[in-house]
Amino acid sequence: MAIKDLSEILQTHPFVNDLTEQHLQTLISCVTNVRFSEGTYIFHEGEEADKFYLIRAGRVALEIHAGKKGIIRVQTIGPGEVLGWSWLISPYRWHYDACVVEDVRALTFDGKCLRTKCETDHNFGYEMLKRFSQVLEQNLKATRMQLLDIYGS
């Protein structure tokens, strides 16, 4: 798929809403179109976090291993949402497993490429930090709800 096509796809995702044209171009310089089949894992806890994903179609479950309780699904991410924030925060390791529960089409972004661009252009870096702070907040809320469900009764 041509870069122009990816640009058009990227502009439809809510994550880039109100992003300047310059910052859009910065993102586009680090993007790839990807697909994942149901039942596969996009990443595992502890692995190097060197990407993030804008989900276009399908669903991904974030899971943790909880010893005797087994696998706990913390959150399910779908179209219009963001998968992954660990690429931005050292030590750049995933904190969950990401299991595809419905075939996924997504845009993936090279985290190393974007970290370099964030360091070079602090305005871009600040914009990414603001947007990923919201992703982190959503993740924390989902985890809190799971904890209340498990331990609240």
Image (tube, rainbow, N blue to C red):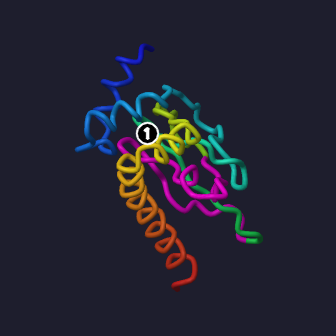
Mark 1: amino acid: Ile
Q: Is residue 87 above or below residue 39?
A: below
In the image, residue 137 lies in the stretch drawn in magenta: no
**Closest to the observer, 98 or 19:** 19
The answer to whether residue 113 is left or right of residue 25 is right
In the image, residue 76 lies in the stretch drawn in magenta: yes
- The residue at which mark 1 appears reads as 55
Residue at 62% over, 40% down: 42
**Closest to the observer, 2 or 124:** 124
* Residue 28 screen position, x and y as percent: 41, 29
Q: Secondary structure at mark 1?
A: strand
- Figure quadrant of the N terminus: top left
The answer to whether residue 89 is left or right of residue 68 is left
**Closest to the observer, 49 or 138:** 49
* Residue 48 screen position, x and y as percent: 69, 47
Residue at 58% over, 36% down: 38
The residue range painted magenta reads 69-98
Q: Is residue 110 above or below residue 128?
A: above
* Residue 114 screen position, x and y as percent: 50, 41
Residue at 72% over, 65% down: 70
Seen from this angle, which residue lies furthest left? 18
Seen from this angle, which residue lies furthest bottom? 153
* Residue 112 screen position, x and y as percent: 59, 40
- Mark 1: few/some/many CA within 10 Å (<14, 14-19, 20+): many
